[in-house]
Image: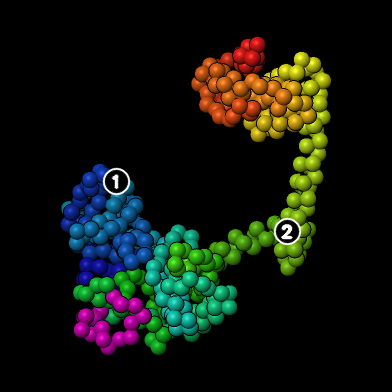
């Protein structure tokens, strides 16, 4: 472990090293292996560190085949000298805060309600843990959040210790360790002991705060979303900006925002119903106008940019008012033609057959039944020519 500087001191931001190997992986990505490194590789739910090696960006760090590979944007030109490296401290410390916060939160869930953590993921914006339970209440979440933040307020030390498998029996572990050699314990005295290979701050106070955002059922478990440290301030700032803008737009105070939004939604639903009623009335007027214009009981029309749903609704309105009518509609929609063929109950023409005879002309597809069919295809002819094709099939 001597070459893993992040275990010696998680606060190291710069270091020097010698290149032991520079190569490309099977995908052609360049990487270097150093004789020592402060770059943390992906593992245990924690993402890799970023930074630079000889001013070249480190884009990924993985531990493979017993070596830590630092993937670079471009290869080193001189790999036979001592190199200098810089860790992206903002990212590293964020990961330290989130990982330590996860230990605190998981321990709080287990101590208060015996809900064990079965998985952990540290994402770019939020952190999640999966709890071994099928239900979680707001009251439980509040109590856990209070205990977790109390541990932060007490600024307890966070210690790390390397032990053997035989020595594990001396500790009350929250979770059984998977590794059998080089076992590293992360200890918050009188609160939590857990096997972990991640990076952590020196004390709980550096986590600053923990906020549970949401939780949901995930198969047989509950997935809890939360944030720690700087992410709490970032999200609070984002939410505050949104809230202030809403107070201006809705002309309502913060505490009355929920009620104002609810009223707006209800008003929107009412307006939608009224609009739908008016549109239905307009559709009936349009249907009557088309029937009056076509006294031969065949209503045919070319539209511009009408949806297939709108054409279907208009066609159904017409044949419900006049059972002796045939309806052929074509809509020219950018690079597509939409077709609707319908007949009233008093007619016997097969609309599915009529549509099927026209679709090959536009490489189209469609479906329906004897009395009502619809489809669409490419604009290989004008809407007027397609309408003529449909009319010829019933003459």
Name the residue nearer the viewer: 190 or 22.
190
Question: Quick check: is 163 in the magenta stretch?
Answer: yes
Task: For the residues labelled 2 and 1, say whether their Cβ atoms are less than 8 Å apart.
Answer: no
Element at label 2: helix
Q: Where 34 sits versus 287, above or below?
A: below
The picture places residue 129, in percent across and down from the top left corner, at 44, 68
Q: Is residue 338 left or right of residue 147?
A: right
Whether residue 4 appears in this view of the structure is yes
Q: Nearer the viewer, residue 86 or 250?
A: 250
Query: Which quadrant of the figure has residue 347?
Result: top right
Q: In this view, does 262 lie to the left or right of 153?
A: right
Disc 2 target residue: 261
Q: Give the range drawn in magenta.
A: 162-177
Where is residue 309? Give x, y as percent: 65, 34
- Color scheme of the displayed model: rainbow
Residue 285 shown in magenta: no
Which quadrant, please, contains the C terminus? top right
Taking the spot 64% from the left edge, 24% from the top edge, the residue there is: 341
Viewer-closest of 351 and 174: 351
Q: What element carries label 1?
A: loop
Q: Crowding at label 1, few (<14), some or many (≥20) Cα neighbours within 10 Å? A: few
Labelled disc at residue 74: 1
Name which residue lies at 38% across and 86% down. 189
In the image, residue 352 above or below residue 279: above
């Amino acid at each position: 472990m001597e070459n893993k500087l992040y275990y010696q001191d998680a606060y190291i931001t710069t270091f020097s090293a010698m290149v032991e190997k520079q190569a490309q992986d099977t995908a052609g990505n360049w990487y270097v292996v150093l004789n020592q490194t402060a770059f943390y590789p992906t593992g245990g739910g924690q993402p890799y560190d970023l930074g630079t090696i000889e001013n070249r960006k480190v884009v990924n760090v993985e531990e493979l085949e017993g070596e830590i590979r630092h993937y670079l944007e471009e290869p080193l030109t001189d790999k036979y000298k001592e190199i200098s490296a810089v860790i992206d401290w903002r990212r590293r410390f964020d990961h330290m805060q989130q990982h330590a916060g996860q230990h605190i939160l998981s321990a709080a869930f287990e101590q208060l309600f015996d809900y064990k953590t079965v998985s952990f993921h540290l994402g770019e914006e939020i952190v999640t843990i999966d709890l071994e339970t099928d239900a979680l209440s707001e009251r439980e979440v509040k109590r856990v959040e209070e205990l977790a933040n109390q541990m932060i307020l007490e600024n307890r030390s966070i210690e790390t210790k390397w032990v053997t498998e035989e020595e594990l029996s001396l500790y009350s572990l929250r979770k059984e360790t998977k590794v059998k050699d080089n076992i590293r314990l992360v200890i918050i005295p009188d609160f939590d002991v857990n096997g972990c290979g991640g990076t952590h701050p020196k004390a709980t106070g550096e986590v600053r705060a923990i906020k549970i955002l949401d939780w949901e059922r995930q198969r047989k478990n509950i997935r809890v979303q939360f944030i720690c440290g700087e992410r709490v301030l970032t999200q609070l700032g984002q939410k505050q900006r949104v809230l202030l803008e809403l107070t201006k737009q809705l002309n309502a105070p913060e505490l009355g925002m929920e009620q104002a939004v609810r009223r707006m939604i209800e008003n929107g639903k009412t307006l939608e119903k009224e609009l739908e009623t008016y549109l239905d009335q307009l559709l009936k007027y349009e249907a009557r106008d088309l029937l009056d214009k076509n006294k031969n009981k065949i209503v045919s029309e070319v539209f511009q940019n009408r949806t297939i749903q709108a054409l279907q609704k208009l066609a159904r309105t017409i044949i419900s008012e006049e059972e002796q009518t045939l309806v052929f509609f074509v809509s020219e929609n950018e690079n597509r033609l939409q077709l609707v063929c319908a007949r009233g109950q008093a007619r016997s023409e097969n609309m599915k057959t009529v549509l099927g005879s026209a679709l090959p002309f536009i490489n189209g597809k469609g479906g329906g039944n004897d009395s009502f069919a619809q489809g669409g295809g490419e604009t290989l002819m004008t809407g007027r020519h397609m309408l003529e094709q449909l009319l010829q099939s019933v003459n």
